[in-house]
Amino acid sequence: MGQQLIAFGIECLKTQGVDLVFTYGDPGVYAKVGFCPIGEACVKAPLTLSHPEGWLGQSLTGDTIEPVPGATRCVEALNKSHYW
């Protein structure tokens, strides 16, 4: 069920023209739906990471994720340091 929900969300984002998605979580879980570890040298996390190995990304176009300059942000509901 969880993987299907994540996959559905990714498909919705693709239809909206989103090229890149990022998440912070268990690499073993998110790898099953196409996420890979991404270092902060490539894409800076919006908050300090307590587990840097959990910073994950996915290209929705199939392209390699190139370094992204500038700040990132997350949805307000998750924009709290105790989640990170």
Image: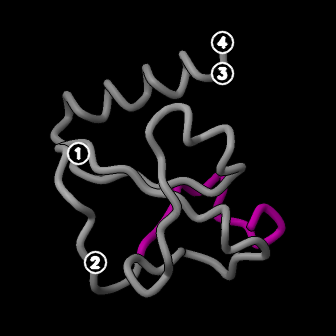
The reply to whether discs 4 and 3 touch (Cβ–Cβ < 8 Å) is yes
Badge 1 or badge 4: first in the primary sequence:
4
* Amino acid at circle 4: Met
The circle drawn on residue 18 is 1
Circle 4 packing at 10 Å, graded few (<14), some (14-19), many (20+), is few
CA distance for labels 2 and 1? 14 Å
The reply to whether discs 2 and 1 touch (Cβ–Cβ < 8 Å) is no
**Residue 6: image location, x then y, percent:** 52, 28
Badge 2 or badge 1: first in the primary sequence:
1
Circle 3 packing at 10 Å, graded few (<14), some (14-19), many (20+), is few
* Amino acid at circle 3: Gly
* Left/right of residue 19 with respect to residue 39 in the rendered view: left
Circle 1 packing at 10 Å, graded few (<14), some (14-19), many (20+), is some
The reply to whether discs 4 and 2 touch (Cβ–Cβ < 8 Å) is no
Residue at 37%, 80% (x, y): give it.
42
For the residue pair 29 and 83, the one nearer the viewer reads as 29
The residue under label 4 is 1
Q: Secondary structure at mark 4?
A: loop
As drawn, 25 above or below 3:
below
CA distance for labels 1 and 4? 23 Å
Badge 2 or badge 3: first in the primary sequence:
3
Label 1 or label 4, whichever lies nearer to me, is 4
Name the outermost residue toward the top. Answer: 1
**Residue 72: image location, x then y, percent:** 42, 73
Taking the magenta stretch, the answer to whether it contains residue 75 is yes
Q: Which residues are magenta?
A: 72-84
Taking the magenta stretch, the answer to whether it contains residue 54 is no
The circle drawn on residue 68 is 2
* Left/right of residue 79 with respect to residue 74 in the rendered view: right
Residue at 30%, 35% (x, y): give it.
13
